[in-house]
């Protein structure tokens, strides 16, 4: 039984495109390195050692005077190192969990599962959501007060939502498989 399961995993991994492996390597290594590099850059701006003419308002969204670049970039900057490292830690835990579910639970059991849905989700998380996260933050910070905001927490929350969706999807597939074993006719109805 175990060898059949591992055979399915190997077959599924062989069916994955090169882009799939590149995306996962990027999620594991490039994103955390990028966040750390941005924090080093921000610390350089704050200390005056890097680009003294660069405005903090380019990276932190000022609630009274927001700009388009700051609405996007503020989701990749942090107030301090603790904030940055905490976000990276939670992000890595979620990405590892998503990778395990995607690779070892969902892909081996669902032969028709495609990669495009995951890629579209990543585009939403990293490119579209930063603007909507900043928009919501602007509304909240205008109500409760506060001069500026920043952080990767909103994107981490998007990954948390995706993780919850994968758990639901995996449980649905598991339940469908159990029903299919008991009564194949009912399982055909559930596929639709």
Image (cartoon, rainbow, N blue to C red):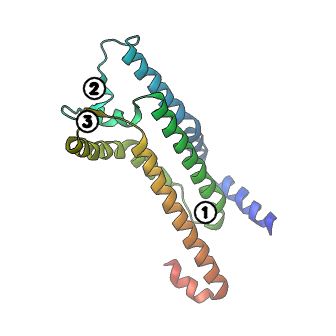
Tag 2 residue: 57
**Residue pictured at 51% horizontal, 56% vertical:** 163
Crowdedness near tag 1: few (<14), some (14–19) or many (≥20) residues, C-alpha within 10 Å: many
Look at the image and tell me whether residue 177 can be seen.
yes
Q: Are marks 2 and 3 in contact (CB under 8 Å)?
A: no
- 148 on left or right of 97: left
Tag 3 residue: 146
**Residue pictured at 40% horizontal, 31% vertical:** 77
Q: Spatial distance from mark 1 to mark 2, Cα to Cα?
A: 43 Å
Q: Which mark is residue 106?
A: 1
Element on which disc 3 rests: loop
The answer to which of 145 and 113 lies nearer the viewer is: 145
Q: Is residue 114 above or below residue 37?
A: below
**Residue pictured at 55% horizontal, 83% vertical:** 188
Which numbered disc flags the more N-terminal residue, 1 or 2? 2
The answer to which of 63 and 22 lies nearer the viewer is: 63
Please state the horizontal and vertical placement of residue 170, each as a whole percent of the image. 57, 67
Q: Name, please, the residue furthest toward the front.
A: 144
Q: Spatial distance from mark 3 to mark 1, Cα to Cα?
A: 43 Å
- 144 on left or right of 89: left
């Amino acid at each position: 039984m175990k060898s059949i399961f591992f055979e399915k995993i190997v077959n599924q991994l062989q069916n994955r495109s090169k882009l799939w492996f590149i995306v996962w390597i990027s999620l594991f290594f490039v994103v955390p390195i990028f966040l750390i590099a941005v924090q080093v850059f921000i610390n350089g701006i704050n200390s005056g050692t890097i680009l003294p003419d660069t405005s903090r308002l380019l990276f932190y969204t000022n609630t009274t005077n927001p700009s388009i670049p700051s609405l996007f970039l503020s989701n990749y900057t942090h107030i301090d190192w603790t904030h940055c490292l905490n976000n990276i830690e939670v992000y890595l835990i979620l990405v590892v969990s998503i990778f395990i579910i995607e690779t070892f639970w969902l892909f081996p059991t669902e032969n028709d599962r495609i990669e495009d849905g995951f890629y579209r989700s990543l585009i939403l998380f990293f490119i579209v959501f930063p603007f909507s996260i900043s928009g919501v933050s602007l509304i909240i910070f205008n109500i409760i007060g506060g001069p500026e905001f920043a952080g990767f927490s909103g994107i981490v929350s998007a990954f948390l939502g995706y993780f919850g969706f994968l758990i639901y999807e995996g449980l649905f597939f598991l339940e469908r498989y159990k029903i299919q074993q008991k009564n194949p006719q009912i399982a055909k109805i559930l596929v639709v």
